[in-house]
Image: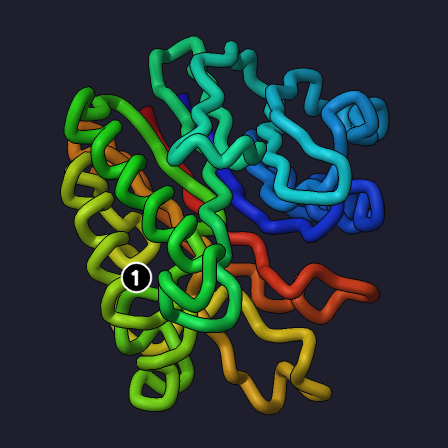
């Protein structure tokens, strides 16, 4: 089986329904994992996506916040929807394809603006969430699995526009990078995107605050595709669809894609 998987923080699936449909029409990934859907599951515009061939959906939702969904052309059955750190947030759903591959779709907490657990509850929640992810992978090491989503951390120096200037900015602080590294190591996850694009600046997010995001190019790679070692070698053709960030009324994230021959 060969399939292409895409992950995209859509920043409201109902507001950007037309953009999701455009991506499905133009790129036609077999599987699309969405984060920050900001919608109860029953209000996700499923009919439009079904009409484009995405007849299978598993999701967890909340009104106005968080939310994750997996749209698939391929049959997929729900495996789990974990509430790491007991936050009561819709931040994870996983499903299994008929070939036995499990797909985890994650939306890690952003962490607020102040990188200090004592001064900022949200930052503490982010670290606790990552710790819980790590512990889950240590308890049951994943096999034949893919993990995607907005992990809200740019781990490498070349995953941000300025390593020096962002060392004290949430998403690139050493403590966050260390937590993400422990989570990745706990599952022996392979960073598929960087396996295929090992060198150079690489971003998937550009702030709405920039009046000319494309020219300024102050981006961060917050969105990731990982795979367990037993299937990571089957992945190829990773790419980030930067032009999507320039669509009308866009999300501040661009989709990240990879193809797997399994």
Position of residue 170 in the picture relative to residue 232 (left or right):
right
Where is residue 57, by image quadrant? top right
Local SS, label 1: helix
Q: What is the x, y in percent for residue 250?
A: 75, 62
Q: Residue at x 58, y 67 (%)?
A: 242
Callout 1 crowding tier (Cα within 10 Å): few <14, some 14–19, many ≥20: many
Q: What is the x, y in percent for residue 115?
A: 39, 70
- Compared to residue 203, the image places residue 57 above or below, namely above
Q: Residue at x 36, y 77 (%)?
A: 201
Return the residue nearer the eye: 111 or 152: 111
Where is residue 104, by image quadrant? top left
Q: Residue at x 50, y 57 (%)?
A: 110
Position of residue 217 in the picture relative to residue 2 (left or right):
right
In the picture, which quadrant includes the C terminus? Answer: top left
Residue underneath mark 1: 176
- Compared to residue 219, the image places residue 176 above or below, namely above
Where is residue 207, by image quadrant? bottom right
Q: What is the x, y in percent for residue 147?
A: 37, 36
In the picture, which quadrant includes the N terminus? Answer: top left
- Compared to residue 69, the image places residue 220 above or below, namely below
Return the residue nearer the eye: 70 or 235: 70
Return the residue nearer the eye: 181 or 131: 131
What is the total number of numbered labels drawn onto the structure image? 1
Could you tell me if residue 51 is visible in this image?
no
Q: Residue furthest front?
A: 118
Q: What is the x, y in percent for residue 237?
A: 39, 50
């Amino acid at each position: 089986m060969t399939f292409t998987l895409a992950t995209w923080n859509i920043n409201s699936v109902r507001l950007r329904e037309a953009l999701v449909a455009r991506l499905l029409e133009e790129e036609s990934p077999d599987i699309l994992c969405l984060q920050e859907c900001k919608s109860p599951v029953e209000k996700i515009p499923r009919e439009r996506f079904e009409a484009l061939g995405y007849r299978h959906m598993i999701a967890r939702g909340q009104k106005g916040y968080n939310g994750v969904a997996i749209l698939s052309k391929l049959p997929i059955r729900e495996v789990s929807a974990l509430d790491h750190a007991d936050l009561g947030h819709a931040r994870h759903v996983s499903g299994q394809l008929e070939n036995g591959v499990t797909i985890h779709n994650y939306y890690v907490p952003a962490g607020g603006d102040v990188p200090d657990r004592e001064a900022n509850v949200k930052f503490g929640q982010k670290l606790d969430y990552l710790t819980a992810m790590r512990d889950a992978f240590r308890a049951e090491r994943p096999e034949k699995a893919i993990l995607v989503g907005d992990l809200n951390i740019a781990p490498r120096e070349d995953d941000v526009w300025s390593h020096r200037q962002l060392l004290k900015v949430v998403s690139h602080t050493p403590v966050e990078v260390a937590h993400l590294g422990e989570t990745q190591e706990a599952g022996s996850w392979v960073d598929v995107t960087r396996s295929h694009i090992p060198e150079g600046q690489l971003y998937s997010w550009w702030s709405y605050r920039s009046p000319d995001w494309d020219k300024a190019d102050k981006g961060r790679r917050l969105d990731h595709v990982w795979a367990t070692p037993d299937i990571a070698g089957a992945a190829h053709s990773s790419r980030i669809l930067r032009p999507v960030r320039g669509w009308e009324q866009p999300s501040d994230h661009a989709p990240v894609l990879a193809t797997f021959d399994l």
